[in-house]
Image: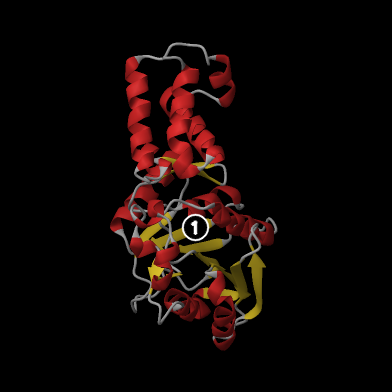
Amino acid sequence: MTLREITRNAITRLTPLYGSGEAQWLMRLIWYHIKGYSQTDTILKAADEVSDFIAWKIDAVIDRLMNHEPIQYIFGTTTFYGLTIGVNPSVLIPRPETEQLVETIINQANRKADLRVLDICTGSGCIALALARNLLFPTVTATDISPEALATARENARALRVKVDFHESDILSSTPLPSDSFDIIVSNPPYIAEEERKDMSSNVLDYEPHLALFVPDNDPLLFYRAIAAKATSALTAGGKLYFEINPRFHSQLVKLLEQDGFSRITVIRDSFGAQRFITAVNPR
């Protein structure tokens, strides 16, 4: 079969589940990962015959996609803020919205050098690694409760040759933060209420780690409360706290931060218009 025929057949299989546009995007990724072909290559080589082995490998990927498995887990990588990040079912797949959180921090850092940064609930390490790569000579620390996630994050740091100090730590425990002199604390913690499971797609529910996704319905601010309480003593005077949040609970979180003494609390909308981020300043 030719490259064109294999592509057409695969898109025909994928479209009922993913839609035409995403099916085409998936095929571009498949050709890139399996053969190293760019979109231009697939056009130029459309009439080329494809070996049975390559056709079999593509079929195997399509079968996994038809079972809702995320393509990022199938190939083990994704891109985040210009970096290639290794991912697997022990870590969440970084979302485009989180890139906006990183961009906000970098812009507000205003090219200050030697900032001390802490990323809590680091997962794959994507936030910590992007900040370590893009801030000016920062000292970046990252924590997570999951040894498997930390192993992935450390491997990402090694592959990217980026220095981040990773620690295994449960933010909900009484264990103090690794230092009491951070200029920036950032976190994208679990924030999806259990009741929201029913509205979520199979590729998330069946494959991504629930430990990093869900919080109890009766305490949706569980992680934010713990982080904010520790941040009041771990942030320097004028240090900044950055959260990715569940838009449903933004007003409650603003009140929580006000009660903890934070000032200049700002809610920021993501590119879809959702109230997705909160920044706050430690006045002490």
Q: Quadrant of the C terminus?
A: bottom right
Badge 1: few (under 14), some or many (20 or more) residues near its Cα, within 10 Å?
many
> On the rendered image, what quadrant is the N terminus found in?
top left
Question: Can residue 113 be seen here?
Answer: no
Q: Which residue is mark 1?
A: 140
Q: Position of residue 100 (x, y in %)?
A: 61, 56
Q: Residue at x 31, y 60 (%)?
A: 146
Q: Residue furthest right?
A: 110
Q: Nearer the viewer, residue 281 or 86?
A: 86
Colouring mode (rainbow / by chain / secondary structure / one colour): secondary structure
Horizontal and vertical percent for residue 135? Answer: 60, 53
- Could you tell me the amino acid type at mark 1? Val
Which residue lies at the image location 40% right of the left edge and 65% below the top edge? 198
The number of callouts visible is 1
Note whether 97 is above or below 14 in the view shown.
below
Q: Nearer the viewer, residue 276 or 113?
A: 276
What is the x, y in percent for residue 227? 46, 75
Residue 94's spot in the image, x, y percent?
48, 52
Q: Nearer the viewer, residue 56 or 247?
A: 56
In the rendered view, would you say 173 is above or below 202?
A: below
From this view, report whether residue 201 is shown above or below residue 145.
above
